[in-house]
Structure formats: structure tokens, C-alpha cells
Image (cartoon, rainbow, N blue to C red):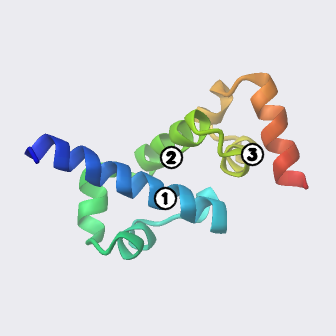
Amino acid sequence: MSKHKHSAARKTLLIRAALALAKAHGYKCVTREQIAQKCDVSPALVSYHMGTMTEMRRTLIRHAISEKVLRVIGQAVAAGDPEARRVPVELRKEALQALAG
């Protein structure tokens, strides 16, 4: 596997772990350390692939939107996350309903 493909695969693994953690604990509560522990890597590697916490949350929300992870989208909308403002109105409504019930 080439270095680029390996890096992309690692980032995908980290994003999936972050989404799982966000669903379980809330997207604002996800930390580098939690992601690292879940993936059995160092927090520095998470930072390398995901950037700052702001960049990580932006990526997390974008993937939640593309995969329609309603609970995470709803949390982002309720928290006023800037990335969540781009969520289509109908998806936003669905996400908030999922979060409420």
C-alpha cells in the first residue's frame, strides 16, 4: 500500500472512531486522547491527521452530514456549530427531532 493510501485509510479510521465517540458521548466531548485510545494510536498521530480541535470538529460534522448521522448533526446544530449552519433545512429538522426523541 502506498504511503498516501495508508494515510487516507488511517484518517478514515480516525474519523469513524470520532463519529462513534460523538454518537456515544456528544460531539463537543470528543477528545484527541479518546480517538487515539479507540484506534490504538498516539494523540499526536490524531493531531497530525485531524489538525486542531476546530478542524477535527469541522471534519466530524462534514462526515456526519455526508453519512446522515442525525444525532451528531443535531448536537452540532443545537450547539450553534458554524459548520452545522450549512446543513439543509430538512436534514436539520430531522437531526433535531432525532436528538429530542
Q: Using the rendered image of the protein, determine whether residue 4 is visible from the camera's viewpoint.
A: yes
Is there a contact, CB below 8 Å, between mark 1 and mark 2? Answer: yes
First in sequence: mark 1 vs mark 2: 1
Query: How dense is the environment of label 3, judged by Cα within 10 Å: few (below 14), some, or many (20 and up)?
Result: many
Res. 51 visible in picture: no
Tell me where residue 60 appears, x and y as whole percent: 50, 46
Dot 1, crowdedness within 10 Å: few (<14), some or many (≥20)? many
Left or right: 41 with respect to 18? left
Q: Position of residue 48 (x, y in %)?
A: 24, 54
Picture quadrant of residue 96: top right
Determine which residue is flagged by label 3.
Answer: 74
* Residue 48 left/right relative to 39: left
Quick check: marks 1 and 3 in contact, CB under 8 Å?
A: no
The dot on residue 18 is 1
Residue drawn 56% across the image and 65% down it: 21
Pick whichever of labels 3 and 2 is earlier in the sequence.
2
Q: Residues within 10 Å of mark 2 (few under 14, many from 20)?
A: many
The answer to whether 4 appears left or right of 16 in the picture is left
Q: Nearer the viewer, residue 78 or 23?
A: 23
Amino acid on which the number 1 mark rests in the picture? Ala
SS at mark 2? helix
Residue beneath disc 2: 60
Give the mark nearer the N terminus: 1 vs 3. 1
